[in-house]
Amino acid sequence: SDYSQEPPRHPSLKINSKEPFNAEPPRAALISSYITSVDYFYKRNHGPIPIVDDIERYCLTIGGLVEKPIQLSMAEIRKLPKYNVTATLQCAGNRRTAMSKARKVRGVGWDVAALGNATWGGARLVDILELVGVSKQSSVTSLGGRHVEFTSVDRCKEEKGGPYKASIPLRQATNPEADVLLAYEMNGEILNRDHGYPLRAVVPGVIGARSVKWLDSIEIKEEECQGFFMQKDYKMFPPSVDWDNIDWSTRKPQMDFPVQSAICSLEDVDVVRQGKIKVAGYALSGGGRGIERVDISVDGGKTWVEAQRYQKTNVLYASDDMNSDKWAWVLFEAVADIPEDAEIIAKAVDSAANVQPQNVDEVWNLRGILNTSWHRVQVRNAS
Ligand code: MTE
Ligand code: MO
């Protein structure tokens, strides 16, 4: 693989792996704004960043089980109605390092910042599929059980040098409410190379692995994608399964992510002065479920206070507010008295009353995905 033409990246990113490039921002930078800047947005790759330099010749193929496959240039895709969707992308491996401390797991280590919240601009997948005769709401037709497969132009070793790919159910792809986008903009700017230039899928509410970057083709298929990242990775196994007894076929590819939160105003371990401190971070859930509540404890979980939640600056967030961004995180903040050395905890509750699990052991799995256990930081008192 050739890593000689990687794009420039912000120097404050913490690099977890250089080749392929995997990096996340510092905790405090992550919550410095509701919309994550492109610079601070985590980068998660499985191979070198591909170069699409002749945009005139670039085209997206839409084929598979359709009457007549088509090819679309970027100019044609840009002519379709443009939508902006604010959605948080989170890697399923977010918080893996902490899971590995409980018991060793395999995979790139991540602290709590393998996620970011951006406004994605592009064409809706439903509109593109209509061009090949696949109508909206195809779940109610005979096409119900089919899948939409996204294939990239990159090369990764897990695919034996082939491209990264993933699929989503046709039901979701043709549901206008699911807001699946083919994005060519991120925060109002042309998508950059790291994030999928010239075109990527954005599947809101679902683990980042299904939002395929550098799209080459989209195919309608009878079966879900058989690629490595669908079948041999990004599946959630019970704690009893280890590398000597794993049977990949027994589990489904992970799609929605569970309720999650993390404290970003403090490092683990942090030294604070006695008195009031700010406990701030993010909370989000998958599937378009909003955040109902974020509870904060400064005594290891004996007592709790509720944090305030925000999306847009200075507007308190309520999970039933129709104007809220349903696919986006909420930032939370609480002010707490720290009497002495303390364990500070955040736990979120989503709109379906799902709660983060108390301990990492309950969700431990050999690939180290979906560590959504209560987020704990230790603070020492300086005074
Ligand atoms: N798409 C391609 N083509 N290649 C990849 O390696 N990584 C996936 C997904 N799409 C990946 C990809 C994973 S695991 C995640 S979490 C997100 O992209 C990360 O997107 P980002 O780098 O824009 O943050
Ligand atoms: Mo990921």
Image (tube, helix red, strand yellow):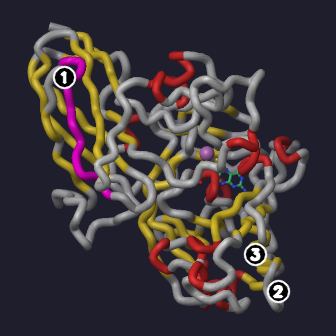
Residue 55 falls in image quadrant: bottom right
Q: Earlier in the sequence, mark 3 or mark 2?
A: 2
**Beta carbon of the mark 3 residue lies under 8 A of ligand 1:** no
| The C terminus: image quadrant | top left
> What is the spatial separation of the Cα atoms under label 1 and label 2, in whole angstroms?
58 Å
In the image, residue 341 above or below residue 12:
above
Query: Is the Cβ of the residue at disc 3 closer than 8 Å to that at disc 2?
Result: no
> What is the spatial separation of the Cα atoms under label 3 and label 2, in whole angstroms?
10 Å
Which percent across, then down, holds residue 228?
A: 79, 47
| Secondary element type, mark 1 | loop
Amino acid type shown at disc 1: Val
Amino acid type shown at disc 2: Pro
Mark 1 Cα shell of 10 Å, populated few (<14), some (14-19), many (≥20): many
For the residue pair 30 and 296, the one nearer the viewer reads as 296
Q: Earlier in the sequence, mark 1 or mark 2?
A: 2
The residue carrying mark 2 is: 69
Mark 2 Cα shell of 10 Å, populated few (<14), some (14-19), many (≥20): some
The residue carrying mark 3 is: 220
Which percent across, then down, holds residue 199?
A: 67, 69
| Secondary element type, mark 2 | loop
The magenta stretch spans which residues? 290-301
Q: Residue at x 85, y 42 (%)?
A: 157
The residue carrying mark 1 is: 298
Amino acid type shown at disc 3: Ile
Dot in front, 3 or 2: 3
Q: Residue at x 50, y 68 (%)?
A: 120
Q: Residue at x 74, y 39 (%)?
A: 248
Residue 293 highlighted magenta (yes or no) = yes
